[in-house]
Amino acid sequence: MGGVREVDAVVVGAGFAGLYMLHRLRAGGWSAQGFEAGGGVGGTWYWNRYPGARCDVESVEYSYKFDEDLQQEWEWAERYASQPEILRYLEHVADRFDLRRDIQFDTRVESAHVDERANRWVVRTDDGATTSARFVIMATGCLSAANLPSLPGLDRFAGDVLHTGQWPHEQVDFTGRRVGVVGTGSSGIQSIPVIAEQAEALVVFQRTPNYSVPARNRRLDPDEVAAVKAGYAELREANQLMPTGFGSRTPMPVKPALEADEDERRREFEARWERGGFGFLAAFLDLTLDRAANDTAAEFVRDKIRATVKDPLLADRLAPTQVIGCKRLCIDTGYFETYNQAHVRLVDINVSPIVEVTGTGVRTSEGDISLDCLVFATGFDAMTGALLRMDIRGVGGQPLQEAWAAGPRTYLGLGVPGFPNLFVITGPGSPSVLTNMVVSIEHHVEWITDLLEHVRTTGVDRIEATSDAADEWVAYVNAIAGMTLFPTCNSWYLGANVPGKPRIFMPLPGFPPYVEHCAHVAANGYKGFALTASTG
Ligand code: FAD
Ligand code: NAP
């Protein structure tokens, strides 16, 4: 090929974030090149094709709001859309706004190095090409770097090995097969009931039991959709004011849990259990803030598990003990019921640890389990994984891995000191995964778009988060997180799921104050960023 392609901006990733970023760049008159490792658009919804995959924020809210015609014309079929439906939606968005022509698919960005003298980024891709850009925007996703545990002997296993986050495009048929699933987070809890419907035998390897609330998924009634569409602007606006960026249609909590008596609490939890979904954790004002309040919700769910799972010993093993909501709450369809089926078995790996994978299955401390297929629902190297798997080098050639050796250090989750003109969408230190991510993504894309416009009109050509601003920001995020119950368990929010990862609480709880903060920064000349104009 030869030559270096020159553009204003490189956008890495073509999920919800990359697509909207490309759209806004084009609208702003910037030339942009998108790169996407996958063979199509969709990001999360391109990769996570496992059986049962669907959103856990309701479809009518888990969608873009930036274009009125788009939100009016798209018809969501289910309360919680399935992966194929969300992928179709994102493909529709790509076509509708003619975005594919700016994206190079099946192309992984391997490195991005700043060239300080030219004030440009040199981006290298795995097709051997080089692109030079003024700005790099990482839309690489919080949950896109699969975490596959290095179990001894895994390479010897003769059966199929699958990861939920890298699911094959061809239909996987489990009929007549003995399947092992490792992991009981959201992906495991969604896929286990569906795999159980097909498999001859299903063995679930559980390290930590998880709380799950019924989804009560259903087809959407056209009248309900029409009502949402008639008031879409108001719904979107109301969601902007929610701490999580969604759920404004759910009844609001009115009091702390312990101010209600036992009967009232039970009634409230029961009503929300029947309604299904995340609204369960909004039953009272303090469920994510106060341990005693949280215990009341946790015990309610444990009671439900005991009432559902017929074998009391099994029910006990499936009953979580950590704070509810500390790990992301799961939303399921028939998860606990699955364990009443004779062909489904739970292996608690705290009681019977996995010793190794053999050619024909898994050897635990209690014996061999024969399997034809191993499904890893073991999650992601979240929030930092996709970034740190690239060779990103900033000022003085410093690798991002070195800059973040003690944990990610950003300002607003958007800018990184030492890495000028590079922006991260929903980076660590932003509300990201604690929100409806589409809402957070739209906010970041629009904030970055405004910043680029500011750069253009002021003649600034280098913008970099200052070290002091980043230090203060990291301390702020930790202080806010410390006021909640989030840091009390070993979650991926803390990096605790990946051996050796620094233990830092990465997302910032609370969307509306964050939005205010970002607006304040912009209104004050991008306070906390150093803006410089070259003289040459
Ligand atoms: P992604 O969709 O992850 O896209 C990032 C893209 O970047 C990927 O396609 C990846 O291939 C590409 N990429 C990464 N590195 C490189 C590289 N070096 N070179 C080239 N390309 C690269 N959030 C919610 O708010 N509600 C939900 O209901 C919800 N459900 C989820 C269900 C599942 C199964 C998962 C895994 C996540 C879910 N999430 C949910 C979070 C979800 O990740 C976000 O909602 C959203 O889809 C993220 O969009 P994104 O564009 O930021 O990142
Ligand atoms: P996850 O929540 O990190 O769960 C991974 C599971 O694998 C956990 O049970 C974990 O146990 C287990 N595990 C990890 N490493 C292991 C090992 N070495 N040995 C045994 N078990 C191991 O990952 P996920 O389920 O893919 O979900 C990640 C996030 O993606 C979710 O929290 C959510 O934000 C999003 N998501 C959403 C949905 C949805 O409902 N819309 C569906 C899927 C994913 P420990 O708990 O002990 O670490």
Image (cartoon, helix red, strand yellow):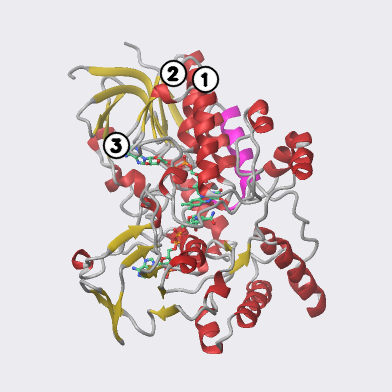
Dot label at residue 108: 3
Q: Considering only order in the chain, which callout, 3 or 1, is on the residue closer to the N terminus? A: 3
Task: Look at mark 2 in the image and give the residue it sits on.
Answer: 460
Of residues 409 and 204, the one nearer the viewer is 204
Q: Quadrant of residue 129?
A: top left
Q: What amino acid type is highlighted by mark number 2?
A: Val
In this rendering, which labeled residue sits more in front, label 1 or label 3? 3
Magenta span covers which residues?
507-523
Q: In which quarter of the image is residue 135?
A: top left
Residue 520 image position (x, y, % from top left): 61, 34
Q: In which quarter of the image is residue 279?
A: bottom right
Residue 40 image position (x, y, % from top left): 40, 35
Could you tell whether 233 is left or right of 288 in the image? right
Q: Considering only order in the chain, which callout, 3 or 2, is on the residue closer to the N terminus? A: 3
Q: How many marks?
A: 3
Q: In which quarter of the image is the C terminus?
A: top left
Q: Quadrant of the N terminus?
A: top left
Q: What element carries label 2?
A: loop
Q: Residue at x 26, y 65 (%)?
A: 159
Q: What amino acid type is highlighted by mark number 1?
A: His
Asked whether residue 376 appears in the rendered view, the answer is yes
